[in-house]
Amino acid sequence: MPSGQGPFKGTTTCPYCGVGCAVQGTVVGGRLLGVNAPDGVAPNNGLICQKGAWLDRVHSSRDGRALYPMVRRTRTEPLRRVGWDEATQFVAAKLADARAVHGPQSLAWYGSGQLDTEASYLFTKLFKGSLGCNNTDTNSRLCMSSAVAAYIKAFGADAPPTCYDDLDEAEVYLILGANMAANHPVLFQRITARRGKVAGTRIICVDPRRTRTAELSDIHVPVAPGGDAAFLLLVARRLIQSTRFDNRFIRRHTEGFDQFWGQVMAADESDLLDRCGVHPGRVDEVAEYLASTRKIISLYCQGANQSSFGVDKNLALINLHLLRGAVGIAGAGPFSLTGQPNAMGGREVGYLSHQLPGYRVVTNPEHRQEMESQWCLANGAIDPNPGLSTLPMFEAGAGGKIQALWVAATNPAASVPDSDMVRKALGTIPFVVCQDAYGRTETTEFADVILPACQWGEKSGTMTNSERLVRRSARLIAPPGEALPDWQIVRDVALAMGVNGFDFESVESVWNEYIATTAGTDCDQSGMTNERLQDGPLHWPCPSPRHPGTQRRYLSGRFSTPSGRARFHTVRVGLAAEHPDESFPYVLTTGRIATQWHTRTRTGRIAELVSQEPEPFVELHPDDAEKLGVVDGERIQICSERGRAILRARVTTGVRPGLVFVPFHWADLYHSAANINYVASRRLDPLSGQPELKYTAVSIRAVRASAVGVPATDL
């Protein structure tokens, strides 16, 4: 950050979705006076969403900010302001005591795709290396882990093979379970702009809801909730039956086709049609478009991932690409859309419970030995067993098995399903640290220590977006109060614990150590020096300082599997782990809206965004509303076997009969009756550990709020 009064302009990464938009801030006299998206700067090239356009307002006041370290030494006393030395010494002592008395597995860390790569790396090094504890997970588990598992199973590595420039060359866009117009609007504008210029370009949207994305698509496939894999298997069946598959690509570059072919041809077509709820003519139409070109981009997000068989949905989609040879060429490939600015970067540093840096895994002895050598640890210092992922971590906390939990840059009391269980865990764990830019969230009410962190624009750091593009962000303004960068907070606690290897003097020095750990791995970033990142972003793999970076992967036709071949997989096509019945006859799905972000910690303070959707709501079909006696605008109660929520009804044909949609942004600080995660399913995909947030069996009834103990004026 330059000294003086300015004005000056600096470029940083937008803190919202995984597009990783470049945002330029104008600073005068130390104040951020405006933001814009600079023309010609990748990846957004002058485009910005409405949340990003109001980023200057984030810093217009200190409303809600965590300004100073706060500590309470017992649960019966209030938090009090302390200095940083006291706070870090206190955290260090409590972690060391818990580890000494109860063992490394009594510790846990829960982080975020909002953290920059340097901070995520230091958390991973501290917990998995110095403390010997693999109980580290993040909110990326809630959004991307099924996509990760499918990439690894199909291609041998966690990485989209595509880049954003492929959007300018594709001829068919298959959007599955992603409302891009609301949640990835910059990319969606790029797609619709190409359709307007190139005749024959088609957008296909597969979604149970008729979203804005569906309305603007050429084809909307209103698939039944949970029916995605069945629909994709039907499309594959049509392609195989009509011999519209790329036999040359399959023979040269894939394995497992015979087993996949056997599943497709043995499947009961009537059963698949029943499961997906799609007219056979629509299946034929989609198959015909996919058969017309190899330039197919599929774009998918939580609708595919948040399922008890989300990995299977992802694999079913990748199977179509392998069937058509639509991968490893420009303008084609499966392209998972991340929901956070550094969800990709966090996976690269190994912050999920089974990972180590450089896409290594804790179960692999060679990988452990490599990292023990890198970190100058004794042989066997890294635990060979995966740690607790998100839901098991909080279940263990509720059961008294976690003694100390450090939460960074996220709000699990609001965002993790089954909020009752999560809140019980936070209340049961004897020592809870919250490291956050905001001092009042649903989670900080349980904190024994609050560590104030810098947020967007107040620090320098590195992030990786959905297309593997790594950008170093500039510090634009000074943080308020005594807030520090996340990496520095972790470093100081580690030093207070007396562990070796944390004497970093700058974010650049952390980056230097991290990129050395990636050398020779699938996500090699060793050529991305600090000097190169100052000049602009780079795609990985980038194995040397002269390497230009890699926009597209697998162009040679060789994949990251031991055989070098991509793998077809048979898939499960069942519905969800939880089924509607007489007690809970409806299906709830949750998701995002265009104007809010996660649990509204940041966007909930921007009046221009709040005014567009001032309160939570539930969408339901007119047929269901009539059956229930519900009038548009009336409050209704939604219940599952876990809990309840009370929301205002929005009657619309945009959802299928039997399906209701609720945005998940509002939680207990707005009103406990508005938190839909008290209701949402905690069932998990057995491979990825991702919760089934898109499918919960619920009951609905019209209700006067006061009749259930909630004054209408409070909602």
Image: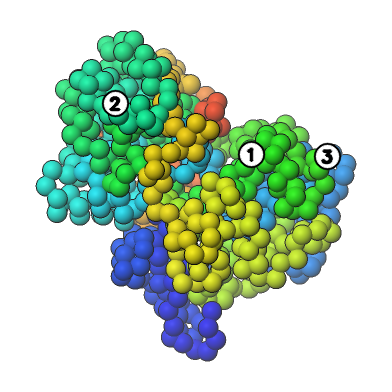
Q: Which mark is residue 219?
A: none
Mark 2, secondary structure of its residue = helix
Where's the N terminus, which quadrant?
bottom right
Residue 362 location, x and y as percent? 68, 38
- Frontmost of labels 1 and 3 is 1
Q: What separation in Å lies between label 3 and label 2 (alpha carbons)?
A: 55 Å
Per the image, label 1 sits on a secondary structure element best described as strand
Residues at discs 1 and 2 in contact (Cβ within 8 Å): no
Residue bearing mark 1:
361
Of labels 3 and 2, the one closer to you: 2
Mark 3: secondary structure = loop
Front: mark 1 or 2: 2
Residue linked to disc 2: 247
Kind of residue at disc 2: Asn
N-terminal-most mark, 1 or 2: 2
- Residue type beneath disc 3: Gly
